[in-house]
Amino acid sequence: MDSRLFKQIQCSVCLGEFTDPVSLLCDHTFCRQCITNHSQTSSRLRLCPECRRPYTMWDLRSNRVLRNMVDAVREHLTEQQALRDRNMAATGVNGPRAGLLMEPEKLVCPDHDEMLKLFCETDQKLVCLICRDGDKHQGHTFKPVDEAAEPKKEMLKEPLGFISKENKELEELIKRQNNEITKTEERSKQLSAQISAQFQEMQQFLREKEQEVKALLEKEERGVVEKMQKNRNDIEQKLNTGKEHEEVLKSVIETDQPAGFLQWWTEHGLGIVEGMRKADSWSKRDENASQSPEYKSRVMGLSVTSESLFLGPYETHLKFFVWKKMLGSIKPVPDRNVISDCHDPYLRVSSDGRSVTRTDKKGIFYRKKDYRPLARTHKSFQSGQHYWEVDVGEKIDWSVGVDGGCISNLNKNIRLQLKHNQGYSIKENSTETDKELAVKPRRIGLYLDCDRHQVCFYNAEDMTLLHISTYLSFTPYSLSLSPGAYLQGRNTDPLTVCWN
């Protein structure tokens, strides 16, 4: 395994470990000093040492991911060598059987100083001929060590196969987790470049904001990668334990020293096998029975933590949120209607389509006094990212969110709402959950990310995240507004869309 790992971190020029690795446009990677020396000794046309593709010194890109991998592999190989050294120092024996089996001449009965030639099936331990005839083993079943060892070895084959299979699965999980970590780091780099490109269009004031947003991204990256690394470390810990058990079981199965094997079985083997079995599995199994035990899986319940780096609307609406600090440069809402007049007698939509008000009209469609009618935007959205800001002011009853754009999908909704007699809550389809807000928002920011299937609510005055909801369907969603209950005229202020 060590040689396979080393090949992955080996420079094809110097044949040593990568030092300050850099990549060319063709994705081949070399030590920075190696490719620099190669360039200096080449003719005017520089060619990649592997694929012979032309390159320039401007094409060199630092490979941070590979550099980290080199450090990790080097640390892993060092730990493996240290483990082998500790085993050799503890046992004085070199080889896979070190510290596992005692020499036959050392297997002597401590009570009678006789060779241990029999195995007591009742007590599961080695005994001598004198022990067999004593009162302590009266009525017990005995077998010669050669005969008793074979079925015990057979019992070890099944757990060995189980643990070997799981170790392979753990290795695959680690590989997939490393891929997700790499994807996260690459995505972080892409977002960082995107942020930088947008900030180049602004003055010094905006450059200061750029650093703030980058700090947010780095914090998000650290949080995501830390979770992934913790998950990977947990998997690696289980894998290391499993490999230790695997090596032990392989070694004792291959031994040709039945007495030594049975001594090991008495002291360690039986405990290892019993420890691998499920609690509700048989505990005293007849080794000749055909029924197979069930083992506690170390893989079950484990999974790969997926890339989840997320900056919300800062990914696609960065300029707008930074420009909010410079109100003089904010353009007004586009001159087009955004709220559809649904002809509900309890709603009044403004002529410009930007605000909706609760009316006191009852008429033939009389409703109960806390009826909360809804208004929606003309357009529904099924892809891309979209942002609205809704001015709720001092209203004491309202809701802002999204729902399905047609009658059959209206039950699919996600809303942040304030009810005068209940407080704030999140409504997701038919489920309603109370929501504690530290500050009463006067303006709600709603970010719909159709690609991620996420709806985010913000306090638009300071862009504090209030709540994130995730939906599973591919339903097109519209902005949904309710000015709330009439409350005898105490809640007649409009809801106004300030930005869309």
Image (cartoon, helix red, strand yellow):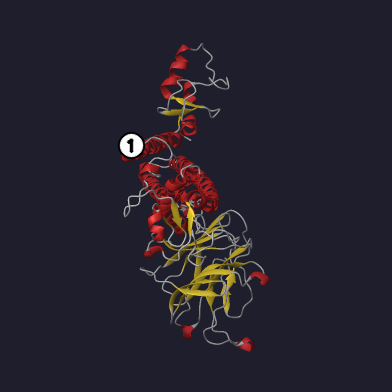
Rendered location of residue 57, percent (x, y): 47, 21
Q: Which residue is mark 1?
A: 92
Residue 266 falls in image quadrant: bottom left
Q: Residues within 10 Å of mark 1 (few under 14, many from 20)?
A: few
Which sits in the foreground, 429 or 437? 429
172 with respect to 66 (left or right):
right
Residue 132 falls in image quadrant: bottom left
Indicate the secondary structure of the residue bearing disc 1: loop
Please determine whether, in this image, residue 164 is positioned above or below residue 428.
above
Please determine whether, in this image, residue 313 is positioned above or below residue 194.
below
Q: Which residue occupies 48% across, 78% down? A: 492
Rendered location of residue 35, percent (x, y): 46, 20
Q: Which residue occupies 42% across, 65% down? A: 138
Q: Which residue occupies 55% across, 22% down? A: 50
Whether residue 354 can be seen here:
yes
Three-letter amino acid code at disc 1?
Gly
Which sits in the foreground, 320 or 474? 474
